[in-house]
Amino acid sequence: MPRFTLGWLLASRRNQISPLRTKPSRLISLLLALVIAFAALLPLPYVIFEPGDPENVLGSMITVPEEFQSSNESGFKKGGKLFLTTVYVTTPKSKVFGFEILKAWIDGDETVLPRNAVYPENQPASEIKKQESQEMTGSQESAIFNALTYLGYEVPSRAKIVDVLKQSDAHDRVKEGDLIVEIDGKEVDRVEQIVDAVRQKNPGDFVSLVIERKGERISIPKVTLMENSLGAAIGIFLTTTFDFPIDVKIRIKDTGGPSAGLIFSLGVIEKMTNEDLVRGRKIAGTGTINTNGEVGAIGGIESKMIGARREGATLFLAPFDNCGEIRHIPKGLQVVPVKSLKEAIAALRSKNPASLVDCQTSG
């Protein structure tokens, strides 16, 4: 009997206590739901990348003089496509809400990154757009330079200032349009040579410049180097200008940034030679290219791979330095890492693509 009574009391106590416990539980659940709903409607400091529409550079985008237009040995036009890949990305002023971020994570085809990992803090959107436009122009010229020098042409070049930061020690001493012809007593004619010289120093060190302005050489002694995310910097934006012996044109609308350089170079070479690198395939890729022919990392690599596969690409040329961040490779797409234009050409020439080294996913 005591056991029964005890059991009954315990059972009764549970029945009486349970409703009291569920009330705060429901309240907490309701509050949590409200917090989540409120957060979903808040703009957050993130940007969203989504796959863009790949464009075939072997169409009308790249034009070369008629005498250089290539065909294969049988006299037929080359087949296949070589895709430039892009991403759509929200602008610095775009309001990205919590529910959009959640949707991007669920869909899996979009990438979410902190805004300050993509856009510089406190830099106006107009300046970012201008910089991206300059980078696109620079990538086209560097691509043509690499293609022509690969084909054996000599291409004279100059390093030109396109903008000067107000905080630069050289701000009142150099101007947009000036040509840098010497740094620390060494002659230079390309941006990479200047960057290499500055990277050997520390913020607070000095460099001496010689510029050319309207045909006159002017010495600029003791320019104090400032600091940026990569180390020491003069605080100027530069581009390499070229005197091309062949009239090659690249036309593309509404696309900025430097990431198409590698594909532009390959497109020019494919159009100017009888060698058929594409061989009827659908090939895509991405990567910056400097005047040393080196391929550099870009942003939005996974979104670009998704866009490429949607267009039917089976081979994707990726910057070697991007391999470590790739988490997923679309089924049916082989991703080959390259460090240079020469490596990219070697990959396209390979008669056994399956033997090429692939990018391995990081997770």
Image (cartoon, grey):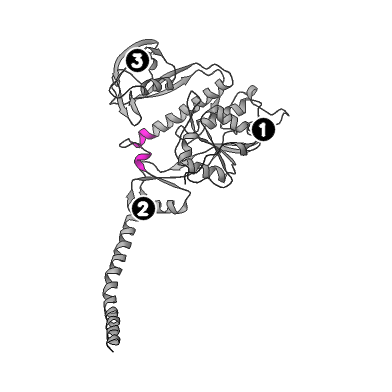
Q: Is residue 247 at least partly visible in the picture? A: no
Residue at image mark 1: 78
Report the front residue among 54 and 209: 209
Query: Residue shown at 34%/19% (left/top)?
Result: 175
Q: What amino acid is labelled 2 in the image? A: Gly
Does the magenta run of residues contain 337? no
Residue 259 point in image, percent of width and height: 47, 33
Residue 26 point in image, percent of width and height: 30, 69
Q: What amino acid is labelled 1 in the image? A: Lys
Mark-to-mark CA distance, 2 and 1: 48 Å
Residue at image mark 2: 98
Question: Up-down: is 240 above or below 11?
Answer: above
Mark-to-mark CA distance, 3 and 2: 49 Å
Label 2 environment density (alpha carbons within 10 Å; few <14, some 14–19, many ≥20): many
Residue at disc 2, secondary structure? helix
The residue most toward the bottom is: 1
Q: What are the residue bounds of the magenta stretch?
A: 113-128
- Marks 3/2 in contact by CB < 8 Å: the verdict is no
Query: Residue shown at 47%/51% (left/top)?
Result: 108
Q: Quadrant of residue 28?
A: bottom left
Taking the image as shown, residue 33 lies to the left or right of residue 81, namely: left
Lower sequence index among marks 3 and 2:
2
Taking the image as shown, residue 75 lies to the left or right of residue 309, namely: right
Q: Quadrant of residue 132?
A: top left
Residue at image mark 3: 209
Residue at disc 1, secondary structure? loop
Query: Residue shown at 31%/14% (left/top)?
Result: 220
